[in-house]
Amino acid sequence: MKEFKQYINGQFVNSTSSNVTEVLNPCTEEVLSVIPDGSVEDANLAIDVAYHAQKEWRSFAAIERANYLNKMATIIRENRVFLAETLAAEQAKLFGLAQVEIDVTADYFDYNAGWARRIEGEIIQSDRRKEHMFLHKAPIGVAVGILPWNFPFFVMARKVAPSLVTGNTCVIKPSCVAPNTVMEFAKLIEGIGLPAGVLNFVCGGGASVGNALTKNSKTGIVSLTGSVFAGQKIMEATAPNITKVSLELGGKAPAIVCADADLDLAVNAIVSSKVIFSGQVCNCAERVYVEDSVYDQFLEKVTKKLNSIKVEDAFSGNNPDMSAMVSKAQIDKVEEMVNFAKTEGAEVVLGGNRSSQFDKGYFYQPTLLTNVKQNMQIIQEEVFGPVLPLMKFSTLDEAIALANDCEYGLTSSIFSENFNKVMHASQELEFGETYINREHFEAIQGFHAGWKKSGLGGADGKHGMEEYLQTKVVYAQYR
């Protein structure tokens, strides 16, 4: 069993708190590691060292800062199998998906390093003679990144890479559920020569460490990937200091399947988006609206597809399609939501229970629900599990209205071979992302941002990098 310490000011140090949190393997429930259940003092120390380190770090040429990101990418690639095994063990993530996460994380560091020579300001025309107006882009200061448990390693890069390349220093709070891979990364970067205090990792709970990091007056920006509730708490904590926030919160992604869609493509894409990491993905398909004339045909196909999903231990060696959920709390939530849907009248076509073939672990069956109504909890609230509710629609405008009837606005999709339909839907769907005839999954050069209660700001691409910059305009009058 491994024991991790806090990583502050370039060193691994003991927490001022003696409390620890156990990290479990979700398939076996065995203890993999213990992490510090950190203190307010740990959090404030990390902010202090990052604040002081930022004064020098921002003076580095952007390309110098980028070189450290390239070194991080190299370190990740050199240890890609070890990191993927660590990630798979702490999350019950299939090894193939874990390997993809590790590899894309390395790519993400290199991608953001490439922005170093492309951070640009502007020259604005003045109303006065002999005056130039220069708009500069400047770092914000100390960036706090609060990580989720579902893609902890990649989301770590989402917060570290753009903040560092733009001249900010960074304090990362890993998830208490899945911190191991992130903390192993902290060990790996010890040897790359990164100046002390530029990047820090502090473990602990949201109510203690998370709250202290976000309400500290020296914090310049807080970036959270988490629940709506967590986002609301972040906004409360940052409000007194008017600290900038960038929030990716929950999702309730609709998938619209039109009668003229390639139904096999739609089924494969939707099921892939639902069972990936046991449905524990913010942008995965959470509800499906199917045109009534092809509903029965779609139902038959999606039932067959979901019934073929193989659920096993992530390390079974039998190439499963899905494994355990990440924690007891998560499987309890999914079970409770499905049971409540049954009481509201939903019919279980497939699944609907915990998997009985396992003595230990948090395994839930791929589940298909019909006879659901728009006002049901299972349609309105994020499940974050392998549960797929289906509804019928008659017209595309009706489907769009049903899709938009939700507090969330992260991702959406439509399946149709009609160009006019997909373009109309892409304009009318109130979501930060719309996928057309494909699975729900974003690209690192895009912009992953939610509307409504799905968040503020966003990540990835040029616009994600610019989240970590602020502007200064210089008025230069000359004679």
Image (cartoon, grey):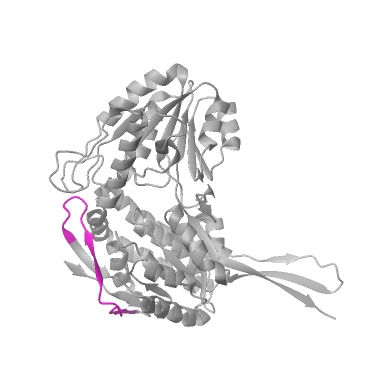
Q: Residue at x 22, y 52 (%)?
A: 26
Where residue 394 appears, x then y in whole percent?
A: 52, 21
Residue 300, can we see it?
yes
Query: Nearest the camera: 87 or 110?
Result: 87
Where residue 475 appears, x then y in whole percent?
A: 76, 74
Q: Residue at x 52, y 55 (%)?
A: 458
Q: Is residue 399 above or below residue 101?
A: above
Residue 110, can we see it?
no
Determine which quarter of the picture holds residue 273: top left
Q: Residue at x 12, y 45 (%)?
A: 359
Query: Nearest the camera: 114 or 430?
Result: 430
Where residue 237 appears, x then y in whole percent?
A: 49, 67
Query: Nearest the camera: 225 or 334?
Result: 334
Reply yes or no: does residue 13 show up in magenta: yes
Reply yes or no: does residue 260 show up in magenta: no
Q: How many marks?
A: 0
Q: Residue furthest front?
A: 343
Pick the quarter of the image with the N terminus: bottom left
Q: Is residue 410 left or right of residue 428?
A: left
Determine which quarter of the picture holds residue 463: bottom right
Q: Report the magenta residues as a range.
A: 11-31
Determine which quarter of the picture holds residue 224: bottom left
Q: Residue furthest top?
A: 293
Q: Is residue 467 left or right of residue 76?
A: right
Q: Is residue 72 above or below residue 417?
A: below
Where residue 371 appears, x then y in whole percent?
A: 38, 25
Pick the quarter of the image with the C terminus: bottom right
